[in-house]
Amino acid sequence: MSQENRPIQEEEGAMQRMGASLANWAEKWFPDAYVFAAIAVLVVVIAALAMGRTPAQVSVDFGKSFWNLIPFTMQMAFVVIGGYIVAVSPPVRKIIMWLAQFPKTPKVAVAYVAFVAMIASLLSWGFSLIFAGILMREVSKRVAGVDYRAMGAAGYLGLGSIWALGLSSSAALLMATKGSIPPALLKISGVIALADTLFTWQNLVMIVVLLILSVWICYASTPTADKAKTVEMAGITYKEENEDIGTPQTPGEKLEFSPVLTLVIVALGLVYLYDVFSTKGGLAALDLNTYNFMFLIAGMLLHWTPRSFLRAAAKSVPMTGGVLLQFPLYAGIFGVLMGSGLNEVLAHFFVSISTKETLPLVGGIYSAILGLFLPSGGGKWVVEAPYLLQAANELHVNLAWMVQVYNAAEALPNFINPFWMLPLMGLTGVKARDLAGYSTLQLIFHTPVVLLLLWALGLTLPYVPPVLG
């Protein structure tokens, strides 16, 4: 090969070496998502026993709470189902195909997927996972030499960075809806409008800073083509999806290929949504049930016929298997934490060492630690909110900012918690250990930046007493 035809090999930078080292370590040592959840159960059980609970009491606490999150589990499953149905609809797939043509080099491709995934997560974390998953599959087909581990972690970025600062924030939506706030919590906080949480300049600053940071890390750490581990090396094959739904073979199948029934259901859904938004008042209506309903209705309309819609739904259901099996384990962990009083001990400890200036920082650390054991955006907020918001009242810290403290910090453990990786893993064929290395790299940089922002931006907000009643 002549000198001029040899591929140019870039010098490997510090970020690339760090990313590759973490990826190699994770491939060897990081457990399966279910094993990770089981380890969390073991850790919490040992802590509860150390606090004086008997094995029988811990077992009862675990079993009594095992099914307590079933409604929330189904909501999370439908976030995945609805997001997938919309993402694979013909119009959205065309958009993905169009987007996939722009990146030309491995570094740009990974940074590009990260940017798109994070922007999509501001709308819906479930949609972000599926949209980014399909995008990374298409980009991987077009750009040679892309490291599939770096690409996978980029597609997962919405869940580990800014999703909770966007419109699918369970905590912010909960606090904005009076009927959804537990009565005991309502007496502490009152209703906190989305205008005071998600739609503030402080929240926008956090989004922009974390978006730039994440994209830079992806670009700087992605290995060059000659050092990349590609999907072909990993034995992963991305097959072309067959979009042809066929034609009706019997008179009974004709309605499956007709949009008539779809349009009837969509019309009913749109009238209902109009009533919800007009009755509750705009953004106050954006709870998880409304979100899921909107995505299902949109999915029906985008697929146009029942046959196309049902085929997409059937493909989405296997991706919810991990959610359905593992969420009860986390509900059991929740029961052990509550039964032993471990959560209360931790909460009071962090509050006792806080001041008006440091509560956002300390509360963020507490939320991030607890998030390793309770990966539930809305469910975990119900556990933390009484302590965090009561402390905010006592120390005269802005209540709405404490909601955002929770949102930003709660996302940090998602970088290494494989529970939220499950939908992306099902779509792309990767394993948690494939994503964990580059996700850990993001966590290393995000943690100090997030905590610094929570502290500094919190100083700009005055305390506003809650409006009760």
Image (spheres, rainbow, N blue to C red):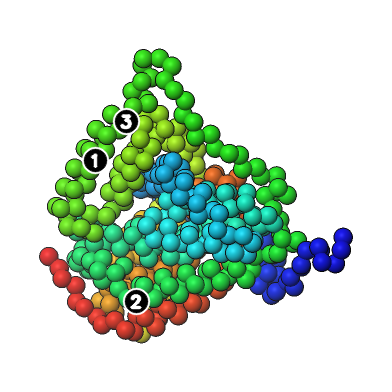
Q: Residue at x 45, y 50 (%)?
A: 95
Q: Are marks 2 and 1 in contact (CB under 8 Å)?
A: no
Q: Residue at x 30, y 63 (%)?
A: 172
Residue under pointer 1: 269
Q: Quadrant of residue 2?
A: bottom right
Q: Residue at x 41, y 20 (%)?
A: 248
Q: Earlier in the sequence, mark 3 or mark 1?
A: 3
Q: Is residue 77 visible?
A: no
Position of residue 14 in the picture relative to residue 394 (left or right): right
User: Distance from label 2 to label 1 (Cα)?
Assistant: 35 Å
Residue under pointer 3: 259
Q: Residue furthest top?
A: 250
Question: What type is the residue that disc 2 sits on?
Answer: Gln
Q: Are marks 2 and 3 in contact (CB under 8 Å)?
A: no
Question: What type is the residue that disc 3 sits on?
Answer: Pro
Depicted 17 relative to depicted 41: above or below: below
Q: Position of residue 445 (x, y in %)?
A: 55, 73
